[in-house]
Amino acid sequence: MSPVTHTPFTDNKKIALCLLSLFVPESMLDVGCGDGGMVAIARRMLSAERVCGVDITPLHDVHLGARDVYRYHDLIQPLNIGQKFDLVTCIEVAEHLPERAAPTLCRTLGVHCRQWLVFSAAAPGQGGEGHITLKPGYWWRDILYRYGGMTYDELMTVRLKLMLQALGIPQMWIPANVQVFGVNKSQQKAAGIA
C-alpha cells in the first residue's frame, strides 16, 4: 500500500479539537494518521503517553517529533499494540485498503477501543485518489459490529456531523461519511476481542 494524500494540518487541527471537545478522552489512537496532524494536536492537549498514531507513511514524513507516539504499520495486517484508548479514530482510511482487509481493520479498531470510535470511509460514487473500496455506511456498520464489537451510535453521529459541518472544512465528505460507534462488550467477547 502506498501513502496517500491526507487532510491539511489546519483542518486536522479543527477536526482534532472538535473530537477532543465532544468525547473528552484521556487517550487517543489515530489509525491511518497520515502525517500525524491530529495526533500532534491531541499530544498537546493530552499526555504524550496516551496518544498514538498508526500509518504506512514513512516516519520522516510524519510531523510528530517522537517515535514513541507513531507506529509504522500496513493496516492490511492485524495490529495489537497492547493498549486500549478512550477514543480511536479512523478517518477516510478504509477506502484505501482492499475489501478483503476490512475485517482485519475493523478488528484492529475494536481491539484498541475502550469507549468511542470515530470512523469514516468514502462512499460509493465519491471518487478520489487511491480509493479502491467504496462501501455505504451501513456496510461498515455491519463489519465493525461483527469483527470489531462496535455498535453504531446514531445520536453521537448526528452531534459530530453537525459540529464538523459548522467547522467549514473544505473536505465536505468527512461530515457526510463520519460515523460514531461505542464498544459493545458482549459482541467483543463473541468476536474474541474482549
Image: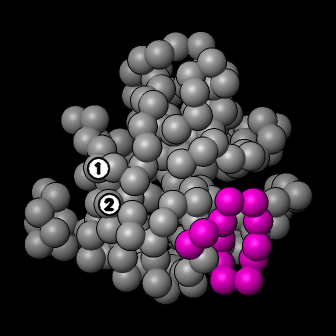
Kind of residue at disc 2: Thr
Q: In the image, is residue 45 part of the stretch drawn in magenta?
A: no
Helix, strand or loop under label 2: helix
Circles 2 and 1: CB distance less than 8 Å?
yes
In the rendered image, is residue 151 in sight? no
Q: Residue furthest front?
A: 1
- The answer to whether 142 appears left or right of 81 in the picture is right
Which color scheme is applied?
one colour
Q: Secondary structure at mark 1?
A: loop
**Magenta residues: mostly which secondary structure?**
loop
Ranked by sequence position, the earlier of labels 2 and 1 is: 1
Q: CA distance from mark 2 to mark 1?
A: 6 Å
Which residue is denoted by mark 1 in the rendering? 78
Crowding near the residue tagged with mark 1, few <14, some 14–19, many ≥20 C-alpha atoms within 10 Å? some
Residue 123 is inside the magenta segment: yes
Asked if 81 appears above or below 97 in the picture, the reply is above
Residue 159's image quarter?
A: bottom right
**In the drawing, does residue 147 fall left or right of residue 62?**
left
Across and down, in percent, residue 117 comes to 44, 58
The residue drawn where x is 48% and y is 46% is 31
Q: Where does the magenta region start and end?
A: 121-133
- Of the numbered discs in the image, which one, if any, rests on residue 104? 2
**What residue do we see at 68% from left, 47% from top?**
4
The one nearer the camera, 43 or 73, is 73
Mark 2 neighbour class, 10 Å CA radius: few under 14, some 14 to 19, many 20 or more: many
